[in-house]
Amino acid sequence: MRIISFCADGIKEAAKKGFYDWVLEQDADFICVQDLQAQEYELQNDIFFPQGYNPYFFDAVDKGVNGVAIYCRELPKAIMTGLGFVDFDMEGRYIQADFQNISIGCLLAPSAYQQDDKAQAKKNHFFELLQNHLNKVRNKRREFVICGNWNMTHRPQDTQNPEANQPVSGALPEEQQWMDQLFTNLDYTDAFREVNSDSDEFTWWPEGDRNSNGWRVDLQVVSSGLLSTIEYGAIYKNQVFSSHAPLIMDFDYDTQS
């Protein structure tokens, strides 16, 4: 099972830069895309609906912001849009495809990077709700992969200039503590870190310069039952489709099992 996650900074612009040309060559079972900045009805070109995939979109109520999509080779049993968070579900931040014993989620977390205390408080509230949700669903008899732009890092090694990035939203001590709780108390796993511990692996460059100030905020977080299935992980950097790079993960798992 191959899953590709990508934060687009606008799916129309990413398409112009060749994202779909590239991703359709990767033989992925799932393509999870965040920050579409377009609603489904605006995507008229066939490139956004590639053959061989079942596409599902969750738009923000406001035009031109957020939005997530998931492309599935196999037809899911159900699609869930939103997380039941009243303050956030209208913002188009989460979509999930459910199969027999596994769910694949596509997440765009709120950002407070270079914003004010109000934005940070909103972000903190979202992650409080998300922690409760992830704690609840881990008791279900199914596995989960939550991929997307989490808009925060876990360790200092996940930023290119850790000293310079403190105390910046996305690398705050309380945010990294939240990640600690996710990966210890709640028993989820950062799939990429299971196969790659390098300190120079980043997925986001806020200033657009890939030679400096990289962050690793794009993650595929998996439930405990998938830990032994993680086979391969890579961040694709050979082409630039947005300020984020796609994250590729391979799992020894059959969605029909």
Image (cartoon, rainbow, N blue to C red):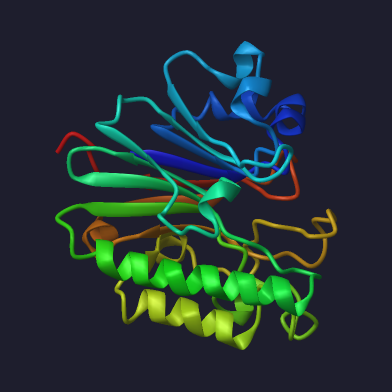
Number of marks: 0
Vertical position of residue 202 compared to residue 177: above or below: above
Left or right of 116? Residue 36 is left
Check the picture and name the quadrant holding the N terminus.
top left
**Residue 84 falls in image quadrant:** bottom left
Residue at the extreme front:
86
Left or right of 93? Residue 12 is right
Left or right of 16? Residue 57 is left
Residue 237: x percent and y percent? 68, 46
**Residue 113 falls in image quadrant:** bottom right
Residue 199: x percent and y percent? 61, 72
Query: Residue at 79% of width from left, 60% of height from top?
Result: 206
Residue 75: x percent and y percent? 30, 24
Of 133 and 16, nearer the camera is: 133
Query: Residue at 24% of width from left, 31% of height from top?
Result: 77
Query: Residue at 40% of width from left, 81% of height from top?
Result: 181
Of 161 and 101, nearer the camera is: 101
Vertical position of residue 31 compared to residue 212: above or below: above
Of 116 and 168, nearer the camera is: 116
Can the viewer see residue 147 in this picture? yes
Vertical position of residue 240 compared to residue 117: above or below: above
Check the picture and name the quadrant holding the C terminus.
top left
Query: Residue at 37% of width from left, 25% of height from top?
Result: 73
